[in-house]
Each structure stands twice: as structure tokens, then as C-alpha cells.
Amino acid sequence: MLILGIETSCDDTCVAIIDDHRKILSNCRYSQIKEHQRFGGVVPEIAARNHLELLPGIFKQALLDANIASNNIDIVAATAGPGLIGGLITGFIFAKTISSCLGKTFYGINHLEGHILTPRLTHAIRFPYLALLASGGHLQIVWVRNIADYQILSSTVDDSAGESFDKVAKMLGLSYPGGPNIEKLAKLGDERRFKMPMPMCTKDELNFSFSGLKTFVRGLISKSDLALDSNDICASFQKTVCDIFEYKILQAISLIKNEKVERFALVGGVAANSYIRYRLKYVLQSNGILCTLPDIQLCTDNAAMIAWVACDRYVNGVRHDNNSQPVPRWPLHEVM
Ligand code: KG4
Ligand code: ZN
């Protein structure tokens, strides 16, 4: 069985084809970063127009890479939300048109579910598992019991981790997206040089907060000589984000009382950070928990994860809503 996935929720135009044996036949991604960089962030209307222009060519490329014809596709899936509505509508209509022309089943997929279930595509990880979803728009610790059975243990009360990477990068004059740029400078810095706060890391509080850390970094930058201190600021900031992750993950594990946590997965764009991957793997394995880290290109936005959710749902007989519509807001706990 072949599944076509389309992802257009933000600034990446992505088309992928996978099969139901977890093989990724093609995974095409066009990053629009260059078109948005000069505005310091993603401009929704530009993103939607670019998706519209790019999708036909990328779809053709995905068929070529997979070496299949469009009528070999069995299921068509597209991100239905959450995300920027213009882009979502563009990808959704494109995918729905293909599915109706080919007479194939259509799935409207939740983008967050795509990130959360990626470890099942890459590592065939079994349920239940604990997942830390750290992307540009979201930060959650989720107890993933089964498909469509997601218990949100923790969320952020302000910024997501990806957003704080982006904001700190901007303060340092680095381009968007900030995460990879901070990671690059952090490699050259001393992570112990600046001791930074870990907001809301107390025994009874499972939620995240990053605004205090961001304000601290802003103050530090205003007193620093960036030519000398940038690398150390990046290293200390990245270390602190990872310390916070570690603290909250261990806290969440201790709170899941009736079920044993044997597996953990790190997902979302921030999971592309090698330092965070290395440290979390070490700490989880030291606690006897298997730590799954999807390949880096499957952590940031991609369409293989969207195709996978449709496949996982189809193979496991989980219902889907034929009348789904693109929506800008669609929290994971509302996924059915
Ligand atoms: O999952 P994603 O590609 O898009 C959303 O669904 O939001 O995540 C993008 C976020 C951005 O904030 C970006 O700065 C961050 O992931 N990111 C990273 C790294 N690569 C991407 N953060 C830290 N280190 C990285 N290497
Ligand atoms: Zn994402």
C-alpha cells in the first residue's frame, strides 16, 4: 500500500510517499526560509502563495523519486491543522483534488500527531511511550497510550522551546530559524560561563515556562560584548533548555504511577539539536528507559510523518473524519 503525504502548515512545502512497511520512497521538502528571512519570521500570505506555486512541481518530484505513477497511490493525506490557515487550505485542497481524481481515500491529519507518531515510522516504537514534543509552535510532554489516546502531562504557559531558540537568536542578530544557528555557536562556547534561571522547575509544577529565561538572556546581552560572549551565551542557553527538559521529563516519569514508562521519544524541530539528543539519550538510558530519536530530517517539518499517521490509523482500523476541514487551531487532546 502506498500513501501520499502533503504538509504545508508553515513555511516548508513538503510531499512524501511511503509504504505500509515503513519504507520512505520519497521525502521532498522545499524550505521557504530565504523568502521569509528578511521579514524576521514567516509571513503567512507569502507562505500560502509559495505553497500554491511549488506544490505541483514537488508532487511530480516525489513521484519521480519514488518511481511510481500517481494511480499507484492508495491513500492521500494532508495536514489539516494546526498551522497557518492559508498554507493549510492550499495543501488540503491540492491533496483532496488528487484523492478525488484518483478515487482514493483522503485523510486530514493533525500536524502534532505527525510529530508524535514519527518514532513509530522510524523505529517501530510500541505503545505506550512518553514523548517530548518540542517544535516552533508547541511544547508538550505527552503520554502516548495509543493512536488518538494522548494524555497531555505538561505544556508551556508562555513560549515554546523552539520559539525561545528563535527569539534568543534574534536578540543575538542571528537569522531565523534560530535553533540551528544557536547550536552552531554553542559548539564553540563554554556552557558553564553563565548560570541561567530554570523557570517553574519546582517539585509541584509540571508545566514549562521560558519567558523568564528569555528575559534573563536579554538582560545579559545588553551588558555583554557580543563579539566576545555570543558563543558562551548560546552554549549556556542551550544547556539550560536541556536542563529544563531533563528536569521535566524525569518529573513526568515519576508522576505516571500506574503504568511503567519503558520508552521515550524526542520529537519536533528542537529534536534536531545534537546536544539535546545526546544528553537526553544519556539521562533516559541511565534511568533504564529506551530513548528513541527520529532521524534529524524527520524531526523538523516533513510530509512523511503526515503520510505515516494516515497509514498507522488505516492499518490499525482507527476511525477518521471524512469531513475534516483545515483549521488553524487543533490541540492534540482533541484528536480523535
Ligand atoms: O517542528 P518544526 O520544524 O516546525 C513546527 O512545527 O513548529 O520546528 C521548528 C522549530 C524552530 O523554532 C527551530 O528554531 C527549531 O525547531 N529547531 C531547532 C533546531 N532545528 C530546528 N532548535 C534547536 N536546535 C536545532 N538544531
Ligand atoms: Zn512541526
Image (spheres, rainbow, N blue to C red):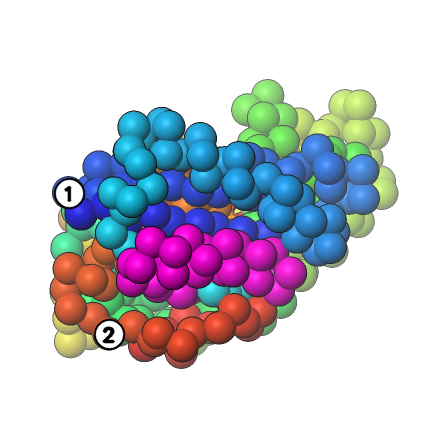
- Residue 294 in the figure: left or right of residue 33: left
Query: Residue at image x 37%, y 28%?
Result: 64
Was residue 102 drawn as part of the magenta stretch in this picture? yes
Foreground: 3 or 135?
A: 3
Q: Amino acid at mark 2?
A: Arg
Residue 199, numbered circle: none
Residue 50 image-quadrant placement: top right
Give the vertical position of 282 relative to 80 (above or below): above
Report the residue marked by disc 1: 21
Label 2 SS: loop
Is residue 254 shown above or below 234? below
| x then y, percent, for residue 219 | 79, 49
- Say which residue appears at 64% left-offset and 42% top-offset: 53
Residue at the spot x=66%, y=52% of the render? 48
| Res 99 quadrant in image | bottom left
Task: Tell me which amino acid carries mark 1.
Answer: His
* Pointer 2 residue: 319
